[in-house]
Amino acid sequence: MGHLSACKTEVQLLSPLTYALLKQAGSAEAEDAFLDFVTQAAYAMRLPSVDYKVKQWILANRDRYAADPAAFEDAAAKTLPITEKPVILRPASSFCSQRAKYLIFPYLPRGMLSIVGGVSGTGKTSLMLSMAAAISPGSPLPFESQDARTPGSVIYLTMENDPNIILRPRLERMGADLDRCYLLNTAGVNMASTELEAAAKEIKPALMVFDPIQAGVQMSRAEQIRPVMDTLISLSKTLDVATVLISHMSKPGPGVVSALDRLLGSSDFRNAARSVVIVGRDPENPEQRVFAHAKNSIGRPGPAQRYHIDEGGCVVFDGETDLTADQIIAQTENAAPRRAKAANALSAAIQRGIHTFE
């Protein structure tokens, strides 16, 4: 009889051949066995409760697909009416305890979504390119404890940075394996498109980056965002890939001080992400960049890390700091008016000097 094995989500179905043998043997349990097969088939294909039409279809078609169960399931999924998903409750004992896996511990989990957010000019793209450059040849980053990792492919999808002028030169300077880095300008591309999904399944990347978030839908509409997030979550889990969405920050509103609340777009983005990292500036040194964990749903947040970008455009990591995501975002926002004020004062002084000389 069909049953659920512990730690497995797939259903082992009673095959049409087994049913036929039971029927030929005149087993009194044959009809019950077939009904059990129908019920489990419906469950495996996430069909609604098994009604008369569903049973009739499976009865009429089971022999036709007896030699090819995959074709049977595919045909059923395309033919049978699917109006709702059944509620399947399982005891906790039927699940396996597992540890989360990370591409870059503890900031980028594998098989899940992460967000890297920050205001413009804080170095979000440079930070992610440095991570891509380390992942492609299998090199560890300075703040990682491991000595090496398996080289992995990277898909970097951008809407704001030219792959020829910005991405390829930076990756090259950072020591990336360029043959493992796949770049695409995705203006107008839906994040959940079937074409993109097919490409990802062929490449099987370790890291996939959307720079910035570009859903191809209205960013503030939760009913449009959630299906896109569900598709990305499913793809991330299937491929065991760390998927990163780069997000800009909104301007601070009255009473809005949390970095998480400042991420652009629907709250479904940050709700779907298991890890959120915020990029900003060090209050003691505005030229020093910092990335800090604002959310980690699967473990302890990692320590904030300081870094700077050298003259060649490469990221240099400078060690840990106690700064929080909220602190670095507040500093970044406060730094802009000060820089503008200083620039205006310098311009005025130059003008005074010119007039005095004349």
Image: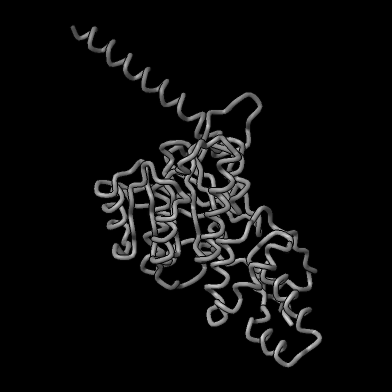
Is residue 154 shown above or below 323? below
Please name whichever residue, 246 or 291, is drawn nearer the observer in this view of the structure.
Answer: 246
- Position of residue 118 relative to residue 255, above or below, is below
The x and y percentages for residue 56 are 68, 68
Residue 295 image offset from top left, x and y in percent: 62, 49
Q: Quarter of the image for the N terminus: give it.
A: bottom right
Judged left or right of residue 119, residue 273 is right
198 over 256 or under it: above or below: below
Looking at the image, which is closer to me, 356 or 152? 152
Residue at point 44% right, 49% down? 210
> Considering depth in this image, is 324 or 353 the residue closer to the camera?
324
Q: Is residue 126 visible?
A: yes
Q: Quadrant of residue 300?
A: bottom right
Residue 151 lies, in percent from the top left, at 40, 70
Name of the residue lying farthest toward the left: 358
Q: Is residue 280 visible?
A: no
Q: Quadrant of the C terminus?
A: top left
Q: How many marks?
A: 0
The residue depicted at 70 percent of the width and 90 percent of the height is 24
Determine the residue positioned at 56% across, 59% down.
234
Judged left or right of residue 235, residue 186 is left
Residue 307, image x and y in percent? 44, 50
Work out whether 281 lies above or below 208.
above
